[in-house]
Image: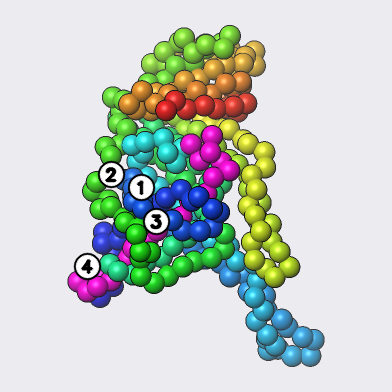
């Protein structure tokens, strides 16, 4: 029978040695979309004088795991902010729900977070999209002895609208409540680069410059936000995500503003920003 996403299990666990899958209980979140991939990047050798391919040569393998989830903890977010040097193994069990397919497993070891986008707003459950780059290998077969993958229904309760709040301000303090905020999005990008050996195996995936960008959507209640853009003020933004987990962005500068006005709608402002740094409470 065909496999269905409603039958699969997925989780991750931090590695003690880069690229080596670990035992123990793996962590789970409420994952709503999963995309895992292997690209062999094979090279086609085509000689002059022939329409045919002479050889298919092995290329530089790339593995990637992209998860869209509703966070209930800061664990994956910390891979973007604090723990960017650490790696984890993603474990995916596939099943047809009838036969013994649940025993079939895919492991993506050596996964390091490259980019994470977190978003929310009034009436919304907090959502995040995390992109991990692996070490170019995939392990298949039966589950690793001593490792367990919990049922996804055991994941914690995601952060919801009443858990969230938004504040900002100048002078290094976020003392103004952003009651007019209708949506926010923050992107953390580690700008990793894949480094290969002569034998085409991956040597490392180092993080380069750290970019923190995002966008805030406001209802147009007054001219304050426009003045802040015009004056190029430096701000601090504090976003309470849930369970007292506060994401603080410092050295924030608005990049621009756009004011779309129509005859039938409320005016809203979409203001992109850049930040110098970010921290998250435990």
Give the spatial CA distance, label 2 vs label 3: 19 Å
Q: Which is nearer the N-term, disc 4 or disc 3?
A: 3
Q: Which mark is residue 130?
A: none
Q: Which is nearer the N-term, disc 4 or disc 2?
A: 4
> In the rendered view, would you say 237 is above or below 150?
above
**Left or right placement of residue 20 versus residue 164 in this view:** right
Give the spatial CA distance, label 4 vs label 3: 25 Å
Pick the front one: 272 or 280: 280
Please provide percent x and percent y for residue 199.
Answer: 70, 70
Point 48% across, 51% down: residue: 15
Q: Is residue 142 magenta?
A: no
Say if residue 106 shows up in the picture. Answer: yes
Q: How many marks?
A: 4
Point 57% across, 16% down: residue: 235
Residue 7 placement: quadrant: bottom left
Q: Residues within 10 Å of mark 2 (few under 14, many from 20)?
A: some
Q: Which mark is residue 27?
A: 1
Q: Which of the two marks, 4 or 3, is nearer to us in this view?
A: 3
Q: Which of the two marks, 2 or 3, is nearer to us in this view?
A: 3
């Amino acid at each position: 029978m065909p496999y269905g996403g409603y039958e699969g299990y997925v989780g991750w666990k931090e590695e003690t040695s880069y690229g080596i899958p670990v035992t123990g209980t793996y962590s789970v979140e409420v994952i709503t979309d999963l995309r895992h991939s292997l690209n062999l990047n094979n090279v086609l050798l085509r000689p002059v004088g022939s329409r045919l391919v002479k050889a298919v040569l092995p290329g530089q393998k790339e593995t990637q795991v992209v998860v869209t989830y509703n966070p209930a903890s800061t664990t994956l977010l910390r891979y973007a902010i604090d723990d960017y040097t650490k790696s984890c193994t993603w474990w995916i069990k596939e099943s047809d729900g009838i036969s013994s397919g649940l025993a079939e497993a895919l492991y993506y070891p050596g996964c390091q977070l490259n980019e994470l986008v977190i978003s929310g707003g009034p009436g919304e459950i907090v959502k995040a999209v995390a992109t991990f780059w692996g070490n170019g290998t995939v392990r298949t077969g039966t589950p690793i002895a001593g490792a367990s993958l919990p049922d996804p229904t055991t994941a914690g309760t995601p952060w919801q609208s009443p858990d969230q709040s938004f504040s900002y301000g100048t002078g290094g303090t976020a003392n103004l409540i952003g009651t007019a905020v209708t949506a926010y999005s923050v992107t953390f990008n580690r700008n990793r680069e894949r480094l290969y050996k002569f034998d085409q195996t991956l040597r490392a995936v180092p993080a380069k410059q750290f970019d923190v960008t995002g966008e805030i959507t406001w209802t147009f209640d007054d001219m304050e936000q426009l003045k802040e853009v015009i004056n190029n003020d430096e701000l601090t933004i504090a976003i309470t995500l849930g369970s007292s987990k506060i994401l603080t962005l410092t050295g924030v500068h608005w990049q621009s503003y756009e004011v779309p006005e129509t005859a039938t709608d409320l005016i809203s402002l979409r203001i992109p920003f850049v930040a110098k740094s970010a921290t998250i409470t435990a």
